[in-house]
Amino acid sequence: MAVEEGSRTILFVDDHDILYRSGTERVLTPFKRHASNPVVPAREFPWEVAIGWTSIYRDPDTGKYQLWYQAFTGDRLEKRTQDCAVCYAESDDGIHFEKPMLDLLRFENHAKTNIVLIGNGGYSYRYGNAVVVDPDPDDPANLSDSAKRYKMSYFDWAGVGDQEYPGLCVAFSPDGIVWTKHPLAPLSRMAYGKGVFGGPVPFADDDSEPWLIPLSMSDAVDSMWDPVRNVYAIYVKMWIDGPDGGQFWKHAMGRIESPDFVNWSKPQLILAPDDNDSSHVEFHTSPVFYHAGRYFGLKQIRDRGTGGGTINIELAVSRDGLTWERPFQNRYVLPRSDGNAFDSGSIFTNATPVILEDEIRFYYGAYSGGATDANDRGHLSGVGLATIPRDRFAGIRPVAVSDQATVAKPHEHVGQVTLKPMDLSDVKALTLNADASEGEIRVEVLGASGRRIRQYGREDAVVIRGDGLRHAVRWKGAGSE
């Protein structure tokens, strides 16, 4: 339920705003794949063996879409700088994308490419490309100068020889195309097993293996602007220790934050797999976005026991970004496709959904194998698009039958939801986002005592039927004013 634009939106993805409900159940809304998928196919160019991480931005003034995607080049280059390159595409409608050939970075004998950032060429891959775009640089509320309006976080190795370390790196751009790496790197060191996975946690006075960092971030970082705390936040995959205390057992969800995208806090572990997860399950990464008073996590649930680590997507919810609920655990908002579709193996979500007036768009990278099988040239790959109607992450519906002993007779397909008290004195209109095509909805108002208000009861309500994002909530007679 929502009031007019500029006011509060109440979502039923959790029970935070609900006092109680009876005869009802919460239903997840699975994302719907677009018929044009993949909207960006892989292998159009030789540097696109597989597409993984993505970020997208839609300019609210022009409607133009900018897409950044990680293209894996297939482990065949002598130098590792381009093994995982960041590529750029753009679109006017978010469905038909073009890959502009730029005079920025070449690939083998290709002088022009759509590659906009490559790695440092250290021990391991450059990895990830999470982009945050600040407000219009002409806006006094802008958080940075125009040269740094676009901010990218990624994993890479930095330094020379014995002083080379893996960790968080960042780059800045005025337009999302020409990028400048920040000279300080890594800004937060990350653990890297280097062949000692499962080894014991080092002692506090042992500095012989500086890469062995307990409860450290791993190699994927998803950045976002946190409007509640007014900081940049990165949600990361973090290593947790195994049953025997050995390091690098499986991945969980962590968070760091920064006021300026350069100085970052110490990683904080905030959520790990639990008893209701399969023993093979871990959180590959957990990109987060903020919308309508909630933090939403598009958790990549990786099953290491299936096909090289296949990935499905689970929706998680938080009120503060730190304490998380998994109300749809073991149900997937975006499951991998059946058969040999481009997204039948691994799905890589991001923290940048595009929120339109009537629809929310979720872009994702994917390939038809497990998470570690990107170099298999037999796989399909690309960037996919999935959608939901605006704000329909989940809904409440009546159960089929309520026949407990405390009712005089069974109720079939009847349920009610009572919201927590709220001040409606300045509210001029209410709208309801609901699909009542197979039934009807009536809304009534209760007073502070919990008693119904005359002329605003359910018998006075204008019945809501049909499927609509903004049903007008009205009452007959005086209640319609």
Image: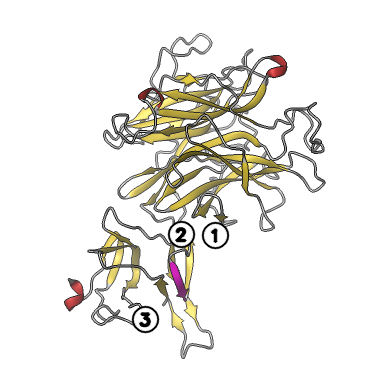
Residue 122 horizontal side relative to residue 227, left or right = right
Q: Earlier in the sequence, mark 3 or mark 2?
A: 2
Identify the residue position indicated by label 3 in the image: 449
Q: Pinpoint residue 447: horizontal percent, then vertical percent.
A: 33, 78
Residue placed farthest to the bottom in the image?
Answer: 408
Q: Pinpoint residue 43: horizontal percent, then vertical percent.
A: 50, 25
Residue at 72% of width from left, 29% of height from top? 211
Is label 3 or label 1 in front?
Answer: 3
**Magenta part mainly helix, strand or loop?**
strand
Identify the residue position indicated by label 1 in the image: 327
Image: 180 above or below 52: above
In the picture, the disc for residue 13 is: 2
Which quadrant of the figure contains the C terminus? bottom left
Point out the stretch of residues depicted in magenta. 18-22
The amino acid sitting under disc 2 is Val
Indicate the quadrant where residue 121 lies. top right
Residue placed most toward the observer, 382 or 29? 29
For label 2, count other residues whose C-alpha is less than 10 Å away and answer few (under 14), some (14-19) or many (20+).
many
Q: Earlier in the sequence, mark 3 or mark 1?
A: 1
Residue placed most toward the observer, 405 or 140? 140
Q: Pinpoint residue 158: horizontal percent, then vertical percent.
A: 62, 20
User: From this viewpoint, is residue 317 visible?
Assistant: yes
Q: CA distance from mark 3 to mark 2?
A: 27 Å
